Image: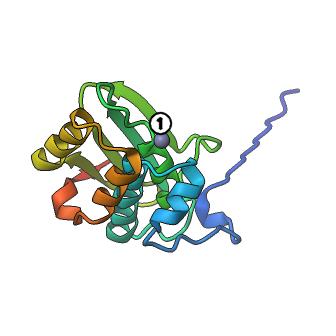
Amino acid sequence: MAVALAVSVSLNAASLTDVVELKPPTSAASVREFHGHSDPWAVLGARIGDHAVKRLGLEKKMGAFVLVEYDSKLPMTGIADGLQLATGATYGRQSIVLVQSTRLRVRVVSTETKKGLVFRLTESARNKFYQWKSEGYGYEKQASLVVNMTDGDLFMTEDYEDR
Ligand SMILES: [Zn+2]
């Protein structure tokens, strides 16, 4: 006799009641504490994450999926730490993925609405990061320069929809 066994394990965000809330803006001090030192890329990640949280309405920590394509010519993997802190995506929940590329591109998607944003550095920001590197600026100085740039100075956004 066949026994139909339907096991459904669902852990979607809507069924969870004690999910931690995000409170942008993420401070440069909290980024430093999480990442371990002042890092311009970690600060950039937090800035991108904060922007995505506000635009996409991701006020709960379980709501974001983040894909980071990073430019391997620049030491920018710290961006993942700022993004985790600001969006609540974590490696433990497999809600953030880091992929080596030739350019920086960050996609943040709402797991609820499937709508998202794609972020790219502006040409002038990209030039500045290269310039700071070639001129030997320390990370602390670079991080404070990023803190003082506007979102529009730093990145461009494009709408995205997961189908
Ligand atoms: Zn770092």
- When the figure is inspected, residue 102 is found, relative to residue 51, above or below; the finding is above
Residue 47 as seen in the image, left or right of residue 120: right
Camera sees residue 145: yes
**Residue annotated with mark 1:** 97
Element at label 1: strand
Residue at x 53%, y 45% (from the top left corner): 95
At x 33%, y 25%, the residue is: 72
Q: Nearer the viewer, residue 115 or 79?
A: 79
Relative height, residue 144 to residue 95 (above, below): below
Residue at 45 percent of width and 41 percent of height: 78
Task: State whether residue 137 is above or below residue 157.
Answer: above
Horizontal and vertical percent for residue 17?
69, 71
Q: Is residue 3 left or right of residue 54?
A: right
Q: How is the image coloured?
A: rainbow
- Classify residue 130 by image quadrant: top left
Q: Nearer the viewer, residue 10 or 31?
A: 31
Residue at the image point whose x is 42% and y is 57% from the top: 46
Judged left or right of residue 51, residue 159 is: left
Residue 121: percent from left, percent from top: 20, 46
The x, y position of residue 135, in whole percent, is 22, 37
The amino acid marked with disc number 1 is Val
Quadrant that contains the N terminus: top right
Q: Nearer the viewer, residue 106 or 57?
A: 106
**Which image quadrant is residue 5 in?**
top right
> Residue 25 placed where, x, y %?
43, 72
Task: Judge whether residue 163 can be spotted in this image.
Answer: no
